[in-house]
Amino acid sequence: MSRLIGIYGASGFGREVMSVAREQYAQSNKRLVFIDDNAANSDARVNGYDVLTWQAFVEQADDGAAVAIAIADAAVREKLMARCAEAGIAGCDIRAANVVTGDNITIGEGAILQPFVILTSDVRIGRAFHANIYSYVAHDCVIGDFVTFAPGVKCNGNVHIEDRAYIGTGAILRQGTPGKPLVIGSGATVGMGAVVTKDVPAGVTVIGNPARVMEK
Ligand code: UDP
């Protein structure tokens, strides 16, 4: 029986993650497929991979089956992780071969680390973290669950990022200090290219340089 690895989400990010997963599992007997709830029909294929509905995946899943959730939206990721757990399907981590990790890094289940990501040292990260290409996390950062980094995020030392925050492409997070880390509140969004010089409250969106709260 084939051992299925599902990449959940057959859209933009999912297709990028699939190519990393292919390298990661190149020497194994795994069968890689996409899972997508909007799979048009049972014959759907994307970039040469079958696209299964969740139901079809569960039907075909064997003991070794595992899923990586390659969807940037934190709430969706959380929902789908719970769905996998309920079905007894393990999460799998995707990590590009050239990711650099230093000393004392802890990282929760279901992380996706895309090419050229660096986690320097003494970093603690929660579940289902996404670090898109060319992002880094420097020393003494603490990152919560379901946090998403778009490409090229520069997260400097002593930054704390709470659950479900989204950091846009090329954003720069100023370094904090051990006694006063820079804090990005839960569910906050940092716009692309923003230069964040002070704490960001939970739930708000900040943009610009220096980053300011965007009024609704
Ligand atoms: N999707 C899904 N189940 C969900 C939510 C989304 O299968 O509950 C799929 C959706 O059909 C789409 C992909 O996940 O194909 C998300 O793609 P999107 O372009 O919105 O996000 P990105 O790829 O940028 O993370």
Image: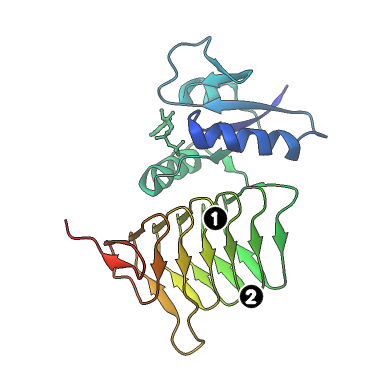
Residue 122's tag is 2
Quarter of the picture containing the N terminus is top right
In the rendered image, which quarter is residue 189 located in? bottom left
Identify the amino acid type marked 1.
Gly
Residue at horizontal 45 percent and vertical 81 percent from the top:
181
Q: Which residue is mark 1?
A: 152
Question: Residue 169: in sight, yes or no?
Answer: yes
Identify the coloring. Answer: rainbow
Which of the pair 81/169 is nearer the observer? 169
Q: Quadrant of ligand 1?
A: top left
Quarter of the picture containing the C terminus is bottom left
Which of the pair 184/133 is nearer the observer? 133
Residue 21 to residue 36: above or below:
below
- Say left or right for 55 vs 48: left
Q: Considering only order in the chain, which callout, 2 or 1, is on the residue closer to the N terminus? A: 2
Residue at horizontal 66 percent and vertical 73 percent from the top:
121
Element on which disc 1 rests: loop
Question: Residue 159: horizontal and vertical position, in percent?
Answer: 48, 74
